Image (cartoon, rainbow, N blue to C red):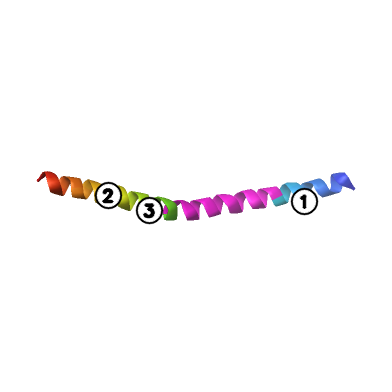
Amino acid sequence: MAAQGEPQVQFKLVLVGSSLETLTWNLLPCLLLPHWKLSWTRLWQHSMSTT
């Protein structure tokens, strides 16, 4: 019985892993965007103040 259930467990793990990967790739831009905007704003303000 235990040997029969193993492939199912592995399949579930693969499913969870791939969905986590998708979730990470979907969330990464959302998490990084504010940081990028902030750094770009700082760079822009810095370049504006030097001129």
Mark found first going from the N terminus, 3 or 1: 1
Task: Answer whether residue 45 is magenta in the image.
Answer: no
The segment highlighted magenta reads 13-29
Between 37 and 1, the one nearer to me in the picture: 37
Q: Secondary structure at mark 1?
A: helix
Q: Residue at x 67, y 48 (%)?
A: 14
Separation of residues labelled 3 and 2 (CA atoms):
10 Å
Residue located 78% across and 47% down the image: 7
Horizontal and vertical percent position of residue 11: 72, 50
Q: Residue at x 12, y 44 (%)?
A: 50
What residue is shown with label 3?
A: 33
**Amino acid bearing label 3:** Leu
User: Which labelled disc corresponds to residue 40?
Assistant: 2
Residue 17 is situated, as x and y percent measured from the top left of the image, at 63, 48
Q: Which residue is mark 1?
A: 8
Residue 2, picture quadrant: top right
The circle drawn on residue 20 is none
- Residue at the spot x=19%, y=49% of the render? 45
> Which secondary structure is most common in the magenta stretch?
helix
Q: Position of residue 18 (x, y in %)?
A: 60, 50
